[in-house]
Image: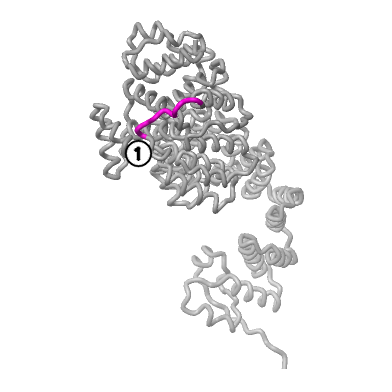
Amino acid sequence: MKDKTVLIYLPIKPEMAKANNLPVKLPVLAEDLEKIADRDRIELDIIIRGLEAQCKIERDDYYESYLLYYYFEAFKRALNSGAIGESKEYLDKAGKIKKDYRYHFYRGLMFREEARTELAEIELRRSIEMNDEFYIGYFELGRLLQSQEEFDDAIASYLKSIEESGGQFALPFVAVIDCFISKGEYNEALEIAGKIGKGFPLYSDILLRKGVILNEVQKFALAEETFTESIGSNEDWRSFYNRSFSKARQGKLYEAYEDLKTAYAISGNHDVLYELAINEKNMGMLEDSLSHCRSYYNNTADQKALMFESRVLDMMGEYDVALELLDDTYLELKTLLLLHKYLSEGVIERELVFENTLNESYYRYLRGRFLSKDFSTCNLIESGKINVESLTGLLSELDNAEVTKRISAFSEGTIPKEIREITLAEMGFFTELIYQMEAYPSQQEYLSYLMAFLISGSGKTTGIFRTLLYVQRWVLSGLPFRTDSFIDEYLEELKDLSFDFALRIAKLSAYGGTDVDTLEEEANENPEEVTLAILCALEKGTVSEIKTNNDSLGKYIMRLSRSGGE
């Protein structure tokens, strides 16, 4: 006796049938009936089995049109889950019914998933040739072309998608902006973004891209505002992540830190963790920075993390641990770490060789400075490392209420959110400390981050301190000071701390800065202006002519002039 197929025809309300693209009488296999009892929705496989059975019993254009639709739905489900073989099976079944524009469209998507881009393009173009109003086809063709970096053709396809959808399909608007960004045509991208109103369905995505462009063109304050607006409508981790960049370039270290923490909490993205480690290092938070850097490396095996980790360990005085991380690919850094290790042990006579001229010259200076003399003593250094408690005690004695308030907050376990500008006296005190720490280069590095954040919280202050440290080493090394060479060596690092301060340094070679006479006439005690004046004077050989009322800074300038800064 032959098996008989028993179908039950479920009546579907017309409005429900229309909403779910179902026939008003849905054929369902009798054995599947219990699987849909008391359920709000019918599974895709049950619908397909019923329609297949119906079309096998009697070919019917009405039911075949629904079966074709659900084959494509099953194809998408399989393709999205990575089941290429299964998706091909459904596509083949659909092709046996009808090879319309949808068949070629989905075939193009399958080829794209298999990285068979030429075949994918052929199929997608065939699809829109068969239906020249198929706006989704133009969009997917644009995506394919964009992935091949054929941006002009991709833009044309996206614009056609927008045209055919009557501007109702949102995705190609975003994609066009992405193409212009990839081409570096930021004005065009901003022009499109500026024409899109708040009612646009993907407005937060538009704001995200607008903010990215503003970051690229160094309009960081505007970028920050844009990301803030985007976050107001959609707390996308990418907006927090990119806003942290905007804030960091404005010297807002703590605010950038907060945004990075939020971005990581939302996304768990490892790249965010690496940026967080950098930010924490810039704030002098070495233990946290080390922890996040190690976590990043453990999850990515990215070699750049090893070099970064070794530099953090260097400032922590963990020289042996740092050295174990590096192979001979990082020979220059390893040699620098060895120098710092030997100095921390009170030893300088070992013969080291550096490839970098500045490193080699400064090493020769240190050998001459300490080879036959006792190492300079610094009350802040204990066992080769900065005693943070001693440092905060000294900073509390600077007779500045704002500094005292910040130090008190840190002592209580909180990080002040406010930023303050440093005074010339505080700048002078820093130069005094790095002179006392001359035998401890790694601790000079640490001090430039830690002290700047303790008393100021501004990336510009850190940039000023880093500049003063680099200038001292450059001049003491005996190399001629050239502004262009200094810019080449350090500008990128300074940009990450305060873009505006770094930009002023970059302009020195072309436009100069505050000259010595003007500085004296105006009795200018702005630390930024004095730092720029020192750089200019070193280039001109007039650094000894800089006058200051701060004794510590005066001694720093005197050391520069006596060591070849004339």
Q: Is residue 500 visible?
A: no
Which residue in the protein does label 1 denote?
388
Task: From the viewer's side, name the closer residue of 283 and 354.
Answer: 354
Q: Is residue 302 magenta?
A: no
- Quadrant placement of the N terminus: bottom right
Circle 1: element type: helix
Residue 243 x, y percent position in the rendering: 44, 38
554 versus 492 height, above or below? above
Q: Residue at x 69, y 62 (%)?
A: 84
- Total labels: the figure holds 1
Residue at x 68% of width, y 71% of height: 60
Residue with the most extreme bottom position: 1
Nearer to me, 472 or 55: 472
Residue 508 in view, yes or no: yes
Q: Is residue 140 above or below residue 509?
A: below
> Magenta residues, as a range?
372-380
Q: Is residue 564 left or right of residue 417?
A: right
In front here: 37 or 79?
79
Q: Where residue 108 appears, x then y in whole percent?
A: 71, 53
Residue positioned 65% across, 66% down in the render: 71
Residue 378: within the magenta?
A: yes
**Furthest-front residue in this view:** 372
Q: What amino acid is labelled 1 in the image?
A: Val
- Left-right relation of 100 to 540: right
Judged by its main secondary structure, the magenta piece is loop
In this view of the protein, which residue sits in the foreground, 474 or 266?
A: 474
In the rendered image, residue 294, in percent from the top left (x then y), is placed at 51, 49
Does residue 201 sit above or below 335 in this rendering?
below
Q: Is residue 58 left or right of residue 272?
A: right
Give how far across and how far down residue 54 sits, in percent: 66, 76
